[in-house]
Amino acid sequence: MAKTLAEKVWDAHVVRKGDGEGANAQPDLLFIDLHLVHEVTSPQAFEGLRLAGRKLRRPDLTIATEDHNTPTLDIDKPIADLTSRTQIQTLRNNCQEFGVRLHSLGDAEQGIVHVVGPQLGLTQPGMTVVCGDSHTSTHGAFGALAMGIGTSEVEHVMATQTLSLKPFKTMAINVEGTLRPGVSAKDIILAVIAKIGTGGGQGYVLEYRGSAIRALSMEARMTICNMSIEAGARAGLVAPDQTTYDYMFGRPHAPQGEEWDAAVGYWNTLRSDDDATFDVAVDLDADSLEPFVTWGTNPGQGVSLSARVPSPEDFGDENAKAAAERALQYMGLEAGTPMKDIRVDTVFLGSCTNSRMEDLRAAADIIRGRTKDPNIRMLVVPGSARVRLEAEAEGLDRVFKDFGAEWRFAGCSMCLGMNPDQLEPGERCASTSNRNFEGRQGKGGRTHLVSPVVAAATAVRGTLSSPSDLEPAPGAAASGTAAA
Amino acid sequence: MEKFTTHTGIGVPLRQSNVDTDQIIPAVYLKRITRTGFEDALFAAWRKDPAFILNQEPFNAGSVLVAGPDFGTGSSREHAVWALKDYGFKTVLSSRFADIFRGNSGKQGLLAAELAQDDIELIWKELENAPGTAVTVDLVSKTVQCGNIVAPFEIDDYTRWRLLEGLDDIGLTLKHEEDITTFETTRPSFMPKTLPARLS
């Protein structure tokens, strides 16, 4: 029978089929190939194991890193916030007690869990990957079935290396065409979410397909899969191809020698069959796509950067209308204002969505030789310590520092403000992160989600801007790699 | 996990869609390492507003939250469920729940009952017209009763069974430990292991 990619990965991991048929079927028990752990959603799970006298079944399929709470300044000093320090110390104690590999603050492999996994080559096609973090969907970029889970499920995976899951429905997201310069993966996914809504993907695994997706790099595919959860989907994935293999090859945990050949042989089978059917299909035209930006307080409230702030009256549905009214009030915006007239205070370049080398390079290419708007504060937070080192080797840190941006250490940082990197009440931010919820980046903070190049152009002009709004950089010819 | 069969308590109308888990519990409260004691964290930002529904009697003593569509979107933090439970909520009614939130609720004995939006609207009106009205949520018959309104709700059979029996998930899975062990022997050798660690 013809199968989609998600169904193939699923079927390859069924430990035990659930009893019953159809709607009354019990969940299948699925084997989990990789469990990523961080300090925030794990302490109660470790404690649960301890109380029940259970072992962690597969430490060799588990890896931990410190990311949510970690400061991005003075990382050689004890963490100032006592509760953060306690939580990090608890992770260290737990990893030691249960034999889990941990990359701590200061370690070259420390960083955001969804940057670290792929970077080490631990995320591979056809795997099941879970983490107590909703952005685990990132790893779907490799053709893995990757899902965010809650702490009870974290404990379940620790104890059994499995999860009980009900089969998902499948949705094809077809993106055909060629992206224009200045338009990137972030704009694709923001447009997808605006189109299907924050609940549109509920119950589905999304598969991103089409010529525009095939043309994307691995890091760009990660950006797209990362935000699948913002459309309500449990997972999102892209079939592996030569781009995937080229990215994987030579990474520390990638297969080597004959194992590599065996792996590629298997990976080549990981694509939806031509005659497989998806429950739903959604089409997006890459040719006409413009840089996208959010105006509201959920990731579905987005428009093209060249558009205006919508009016609640534009929405037919009563709930959407009420949500828009509330969002405009929170965001301090007037309906009808051109998005490009909106002045921001802070630019945040970072998060598991956009903090990898390509993101930093794309932003650096925009600001190189230009001057930052004097009223803008810009934070650049690499996704991992390794990314930071690589960026410094390329001299990107100098580009950011010369521009007047702050060059920080790796972590989740201002994406969710669990560490000191937060917005003040009323402060407005152009952010390459994934959530514009009320208070997400700090109490009363106002977030506009954007791509790295839009973030960079905004830092130059002080208002929400696309690279095409910029005057040519004085002296240097602008290098045209904006479409990362 | 405690068994859930039926619950009756004061209904709280939360007329809002897309209540994400950052609103249910802001990230600053996630630094704790305990599983209880989150009652102060529930809707912490919104509770600073005196007009917020949970700051009004008798809603502050509510135990049945009646919310708009897309409840529990965003972060996977199970702390959202712990905070609702610690405050005293036993069940949340909505026309659509985010998948991860729904799953987390089922693990913790908080009943996430999916009703038609029309029924949610009727219940909102009833609760606003007669604050303090009790809502009964019966998991056996899968119905909600509020004043004269009787409405059916949806929940998947497996979660319903586990809630009714109060069953622990890990215990259930470990009954099949032999199947897990057998599966592990078939895992291809090219698939990665985190140990021993290989570094760049």
Image (cartoon, coloured by chain):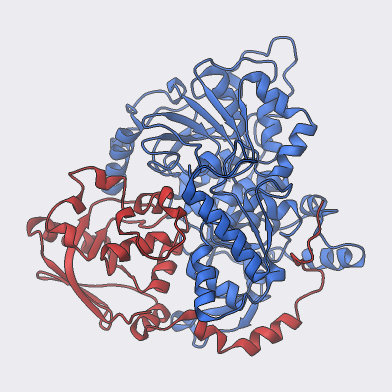
Chain colours: A blue, B red
From what the image shows, is residue A450 above or below residue A90? above
Q: Is residue A472 left or right of residue B139?
A: right
**Residue in front for this viewpoint, A437 or A42:** A42
Q: Where residue B61 sits: x, y (%)?
A: 17, 62
Quadrant for the N terminus of chain B in the image: bottom left
Q: Is residue A358 left or right of residue A7?
A: right
**Residue in front for this viewpoint, A240 or A263:** A263
| Residue farthest along the left direction in this orientation | B130
Q: Could you tell me how many numbered marks the image carries?
A: 0
- Residue located 55% across and 79% down the image: A28
Q: Is residue B19 left or right of residue A423?
A: left
Q: Where residue B169 sits: x, y (%)?
A: 48, 80
- Residue located 67% across and 66% down the image: A100
| Residue farthest along the front direction in this orientation | A78
- Residue located 33% across and 73% down the image: B154
**Residue in front for this viewpoint, A130 or A397:** A397
Q: Where residue B9 sits: x, y (%)?
A: 17, 70
| Residue farthest along the top direction in this orientation | A475
**Residue in front for this viewpoint, A80 or A288:** A80
- Residue located 41% across and 29% down the image: A427
Occupied quadrant, residue A257: bottom right
Q: Is residue A166 visible?
A: no
Occupied quadrant, residue B79: bottom left
From what the image shows, is residue B5 above or below residue A293? below
Q: Is residue B145 visible?
A: yes
From what the image shows, is residue A97 above or below residue A349? below
Q: Is residue A49 left or right of residue B70?
A: right
Q: Where residue B91 sits: x, y (%)?
A: 28, 68
